[in-house]
Structures are given as C-alpha cells and as structure tokens.
Image (cartoon, helix red, strand yellow):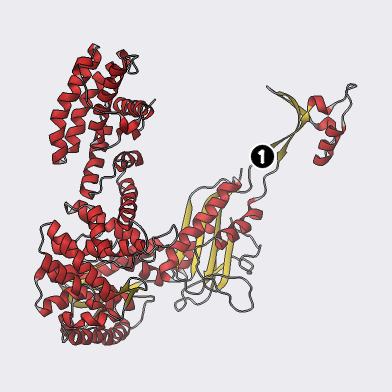
C-alpha cells in the first residue's frame, strides 16, 4: 500500500501557555487513536506546539484503509431450501437485504450445522476522505474547560482559529476544519515575519517556519534552547547559576516562538526581603528566572526571555527592569509593614475568617489543632507547649499583607515573621512545616514540632469534615482530604513516629461539639488506611499484599508499613505459595467449623499421627521464636522463620484426616490448625496472597 507523510496545523490567537502542552498531547493522541480505530497504517508521529499553533505530522501514512473481508450469516441451510431444493422466503429475504441473488451465497459448516453465508470484501476508504473527520473528532475531544466563539463563526475553540494546513504529501485536503478551508500556507513570527509562508510538503514544515518565519515550532527544541540560553547567561556572571523551575520553563516555552534570553538587574537593597517573596514576584507575574551564587544566595539579577531578536536589547532589558522595580518595592513594603505587628497579635484577626460553615472559623480550627498537636507532641517525645504555641500561630500569616498578595508564601512568611518576633526555632520552623508535604514527593517536616502540627492540622480537617457528612467523593475533594491523608501517612512512616491513627482521630473527635456522624474516628481511620493501596501501588507492591495486611486493620501506620514490607519479602520466598495455599485451606476449614468459636488449646495426649505430632512441635517451637519478634515489630524475621512450617504443614495435610470421627481428636486437630493460622495472622492474612492453584 502506498504511503505519504501527513501534516495538520491549526493557526490560532495566542494559546493559554499553561494549557499548551496538554492541548498538544491530547490533539496528537486523538488523531493517533482515530487512525488506529480506522485501521490505517502509519509510522512516526511528531507533535508541534507554539504560542499560535498546534500541529501534528505523521510519517508514512497509508493512502487507504486495508480492504476488509466481510462475512454475514443468514438462515440455516435446512431453513433456506424446501424439500425440492428451492430457495425459501427466508433465503430470498436474506439475499434481497444484501442486494444479491441466492446463487451468490455460500454455505458455512459448523459443529451446530450448516448455514448460508454471504462473503465479500469491503473496500477500504481513502485516507484523504477520513482525515478531516479524525482531525475534527480530536479537536472536539480536547480538554478545554471553556470554549469561545469569534466573529460570525459558529465554531468554538479555546482561542480564535485563523488558518489551517492539511497536507497529504504535497496535496491539500480541502475539507473544512473549524469552519475554515485548509491550504498549504502558514504564518511566521508576528513581528519578524508577519506574512503567509508556503509549506510545500509535510517534511518542510518546521524548516520553513524556522528559516523563513522566525518560529521554532518544536516545543522540546524551544525548551532546550531556553534552558541552555538561560544557564549560559547566568554563568557569564562569574559565580552565578540560574535556578530553572521546570513548570516555569514549560510556561516560558509556551509563551515564545523565537526565544531570546536577556539578563536584567535590580537594586541590592531588595535582597533584604526574603528570597521566596522576590522569587514569587518575579516568577508568577513576570515569568523571570532568578540567579543564585555558589552558596545558593540570591543575586540581584534576573533572566527574562524575549519573543524576538531586538536591534536594541538594552531597551528591552531596561523595560523589564522598570516593570520589576515597583513589584519588588511592593514586596519590600509588605515585609517591612508586616514585621511591625507580632504574629500573636494577629490571632484574633482569624476569628472572622470561615474555615467551614459548620466547623467554624480559622481561629476555632487553630484552637482545636493546638489541643491535638499538644497530645501528638507528647506521644512522639516532643515539647507539647511548643506544638501548641506553633499551632496557635500557624495561620496568622494568612492575614499579613505579604501573604494576601502572594498566597503561595503562606507558611514561608510565617516562619520569617516568627523568627523576627523571637519565637523558638522549632516553633518558627513549624509554621512552614505544617504544610509539608505540599505535594507528592515533597519534603517532610524536619522538626518533631512541625510533624505534630502538620499531622494535627490534617486530622482536624479529616475528622471535622467526615463528622459533618462531607467526605470527599469520586469527583470532588475541595479540602484536599486525599492529599491530607497521604501526607499524614508519609510523615508517620518516614519519620518513624509511634502514632496510632485510631487514638489520634479519637483525640481530634473530642475537640468537636458539632459532629453529626456516628463513630467518626473509625470512619476516618478506614478511609486513611484505604489510601495505603495507592501508596504501595506506586512502589510496585501488589494490591494482594496490601489486602493481606489490611485484613488485620493495624492502625499504626509505621506498623502497617513494616507488615507490608515483611509480607512483600515473604512473598518472594519459595515456601510462600504453598503456605498461602495452606492458610487458605485452613481458613476454609475453620470457617466451616465455626470460625472464631474454634479454640486453639492443643492437648498433646490426643495427637495420634506422627505428622500431627511433628506439626504441633514445630508450631510450638515457632511460637517461642516469633512471638518476641512480633513484639519488637520485626515482622520480616518472623515470617522468614514461619516459612520453615511449609514441610510439616504439607506433610500434615498429606497424612492426617482433620475431620476425624472422634470429636475430641477432630477438635484437637482444628485447634492445632487455629494455632498455626493465628501465628501468621499476627502479621497479615496470608491466605489472601495469590496461589498457583
């Protein structure tokens, strides 16, 4: 089958920079999905994305769908012909519906008899006929929360569309796209080349744009150039190093078609302001990269990326310096003003700020969190007074001028202001650490005071919202309770804190008087333990391991984690499958015989067979070995030791009839199996692990 390269380009007004990559990815994937569903063969797929264009090029695209054999089954042969061998109405009706005569039909022999069938070959449609619909379908499915119309057009898109290219080889596919007739012309840079440019073939696309249009269409290429250019300019300043935030780099790449990095400066006096405030101002508002020295201290420099090559770059730099100066002046003014009022004097200002209508104000929450943080601090060997102090000050920076202007600085500014007020070092750090981890993989609190406040703040939200009947749903989690749960689990596990979720949630529940849901603490604990599933899935630990531990509902996260790691290690042992299978068998036997009503006291005088005597002795020996290990939480060593039970267990089931006629013997054997199972249940329900059989 013949092939040609294919190109589609959508030319638009400037696209939202943060949405450019997702739009490009979705547009490309949508077209690929359409081709796969249509059965059209193709080679490499290349995506292009710039501020005013989305494009996809597909190499070696087949010129048509493959022909497809079609087989349609009609009536059974017995029903298709009468006794004289003439076609019945069933056969003629089937043939007529297909537009053929009965003699054009075949027969199909099956194990259920013979059938009349119609066989033909469905001709594949030409690719040029299919591509417009596939492109339109992909555009319609793009993740655009709010579409717009423009001019007299009835079409809708994220931004007005001004031109479309759609080429198959050197031929234009002229079927309308977004209300426009495609051609083979694109447009260059808005200032360097404000004119139409002909793209002869898909292969010429990015070459024409770069060489004639001053546009680098490849997002990855622009991103690489910007990174290298920004880094090089910083290095030219001697000891300077540009700090390149990946999200900011993506955004700047999406803002520029022809990126030119330029170095600017600001007054050194602004360095007295916390670096985070300066960075926030430069990054969020101006999309500047900041520069640090070898010690990581901020330098009075910034790097901006212009979308053109200026004949007088000094003018461009001067313009940017003029714009950034008042913004940094504002930050300096806010910082100076905020430090005149102590954080403790701002506590009452939290009273009018509503946390949640039924749960009260931020001040109410602070009082609850302080009480809870004190108990948690005491439980983890920290200073309760410092935890309570930090919790009462934790949200006070929300009413400072700096945080009102730069909301992403909450906690960070609290730490600076607390140090300025002379608060204890751990208290000051906790004001920032209360928000850690802010996202998956983020740093955790370094101080125990910070851990106590971070855990207390999240548990207060969880218990409060669950307690008034507002848990997260599959689509809505406005208070970020999933993230809060994972944050608590990570802090407890990675900082190795001896906390019990059930106890902590009960402490939290005691601080509320307005909860309406029964047994809120246990509900929250169940919800949090369920979050472990995704946590371990990300680590490559199978759901069956999580479920085996979850079945025992250990409520200490550190203990839960140790059990999971132990079961995962046990699962790798050669004895694991056989013992899991044996546990499953034991569980089924005990369930049928009354479950928890079955005792576990074994009478050695009733042990008749050599196999059951050996098993009883081994179980007793293992109990002496592993019970101290269980007490120490060394589940890995305990399970490793219990693996020695495989041989006596296998032999027991091969040689001993559990359900003996003698009731006393039978009950004694059930008790022995119960002893065996209970040893494993001290860690997890091993019977839930997969077995080959």
| Number of residue marks | 1
Residue 11 spot, x, y in % from top left = 53, 69
Decide if residue 469 is on the left or right side of residue 158.
left
Residue 265 spot, x, y in % from top left = 22, 81
Residue 530 spot, x, y in % from top left = 34, 50
Residue 613 spot, x, y in % from top left = 21, 16
Q: Is residue 503 visible?
A: yes
Q: Is residue 240 visible?
A: no
Q: Which quadrant would the C terminus be assigned to in this image?
A: top left
Query: Which of the pair 85/678 is nearer the observer?
Result: 678
Query: Which of the pair 243/595 is nearer the observer?
Result: 595
- Tell me where residue 324 sits by quadrant: bottom left
The residue carrying mark 1 is 68
Residue at the spot 30% in from the left edge and 35% down from the top edge: 685
- Tell me where residue 349 sits by quadrant: bottom left
Query: Which of the pair 480/196 is nearer the observer?
Result: 480
User: Tag 1, which secondary structure?
Assistant: strand
Decide if residue 478 is on the left or right side of residue 89.
left
Decide if residue 212 is on the left or right side of residue 544.
right
Residue at the spot 12% in from the left edge and 35% down from the top edge: 628
Q: Which quadrant would the N terminus be assigned to in this image?
A: top right
Q: Is residue 519 above or below residue 366?
A: above
Decide if residue 164 is on the left or right side of residue 86.
left
Residue density around tag 1, few if under 14, some if 14–19, many if 20 or more, within 10 Å: few
Residue at the spot 27% in from the left edge and 69% down from the top edge: 230
């Amino acid at each position: 089958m013949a092939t040609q390269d294919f190109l589609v380009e959508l030319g638009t007004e400037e696209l939202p920079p943060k949405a450019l990559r997702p739009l490009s990815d979705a547009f490309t994937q949508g077209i690929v999905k359409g081709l796969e569903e249509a059965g059209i063969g193709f080679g490499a797929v290349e995506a292009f994305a710039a501020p005013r264009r989305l494009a996809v090029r597909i190499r070696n695209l087949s010129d048509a769908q493959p022909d497809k054999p079609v087989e349609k089954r009609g009536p059974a042969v017995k029903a298709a012909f009468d006794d004289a061998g003439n076609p019945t109405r069933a056969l003629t009706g089937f043939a007529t519906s297909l537009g053929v005569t009965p003699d054009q039909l075949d027969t199909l022999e099956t194990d259920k008899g013979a059938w009349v069938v119609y066989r033909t070959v469905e001709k594949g449609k030409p690719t040029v006929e299919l591509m417009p619909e596939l492109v339109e379908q992909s555009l319609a499915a793009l993740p655009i929360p709010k579409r717009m119309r423009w001019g007299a057009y009835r079409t809708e898109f994220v931004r007005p569309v001004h031109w479309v290219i759609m080429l198959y080889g050197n031929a234009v596919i002229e079927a309308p796209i977004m209300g426009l007739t495609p051609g083979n012309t694109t447009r260059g840079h808005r200032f360097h080349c404000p004119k139409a440019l002909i793209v002869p073939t898909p292969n010429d696309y990015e070459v024409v744009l770069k060489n004639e249009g001053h546009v680098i269409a490849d997002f990855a290429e622009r991103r690489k150039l910007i990174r290298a250019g920004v880094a090089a300019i910083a290095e030219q300043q001697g000891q300077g190093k540009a700090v390149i935030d990946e999200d900011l780099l993506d955004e700047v790449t999406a803002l520029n078609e022809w990126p030119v990095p330029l170095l600017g400066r600001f007054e050194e006096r602004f360095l007295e302001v916390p670096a985070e405030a300066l960075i926030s101002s430069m990054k969020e508002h101006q999309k500047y990269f900041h520069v640090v020295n070898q010690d990581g201290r901020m330098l009075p420099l910034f790097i901006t990326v212009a979308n053109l090559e200026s004949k007088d770059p000094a003018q461009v730099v001067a313009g940017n310096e003029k714009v950034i100066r008042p913004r940094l002046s504002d930050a300096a003014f806010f910082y100076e003003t905020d430090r005149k009022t102590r954080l403790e004097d701002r506590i009452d200002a939290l009273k009018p700020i509503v946390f949640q209508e039924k749960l009260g104000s931020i001040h109410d929450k602070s009082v609850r969190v302080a009480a809870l943080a004190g108990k948690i601090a005491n439980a983890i060997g920290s200073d309760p007074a410092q935890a309570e102090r930090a919790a009462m000050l934790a949200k006070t920076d929300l009413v400072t001028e700096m945080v009102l202007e730069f909301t992403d600085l909450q906690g960070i500014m609290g730490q600076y202001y607390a140090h300025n007020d002379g608060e204890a070092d751990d208290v000051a750090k906790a004001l920032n650490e209360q928000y850690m981890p802010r996202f998956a993989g983020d740093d955790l609190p370094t101080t125990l005071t910070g851990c106590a406040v971070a855990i207390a703040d999240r548990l207060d939200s969880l218990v409060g919202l669950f307690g008034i009947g507002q848990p997260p749903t599959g689509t809505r989690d406005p208070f970020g309770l999933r993230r809060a749960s994972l944050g608590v689990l990570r802090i407890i596990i990675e900082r190795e804190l001896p906390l019990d979720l059930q106890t902590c949630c009960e402490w939290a529940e005691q601080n509320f008087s307005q909860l309406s849901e029964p047994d809120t603490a246990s509900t929250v604990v169940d919800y949090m333990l369920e979050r472990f599933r995704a946590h371990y899935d990300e680590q490559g630990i199978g759901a069956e391991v999580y479920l085996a531990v979850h079945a025992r509902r250990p409520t200490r996260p550190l203990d839960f984690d140790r059990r999971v790691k132990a079961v995962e290690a046990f699962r790798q042992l050669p004895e694991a499958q056989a013992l899991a299978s044996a546990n499953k068998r034991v569980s089924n036997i005990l369930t049928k015989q009354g479950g928890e009503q079955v005792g576990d006291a074994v009478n050695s005088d009733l042990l008749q067979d050599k196999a059951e005597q050996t098993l009883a002795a081994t179980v007793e020996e293992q109990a002496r070995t592993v019970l101290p290990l269980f007490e120490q939480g060394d589940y890995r060593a305990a399970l490793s030791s219990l693996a020695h039970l495989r041989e006596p267990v296998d032999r027991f089931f091969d040689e001993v009839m559990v359900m003996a006629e003698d009731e006393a013997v039978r009950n004694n054997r059930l008790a022995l199996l119960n002893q065996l199972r209970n040893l494993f249940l001290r860690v997890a329900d091993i019977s839930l692990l997969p077995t080959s059989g």
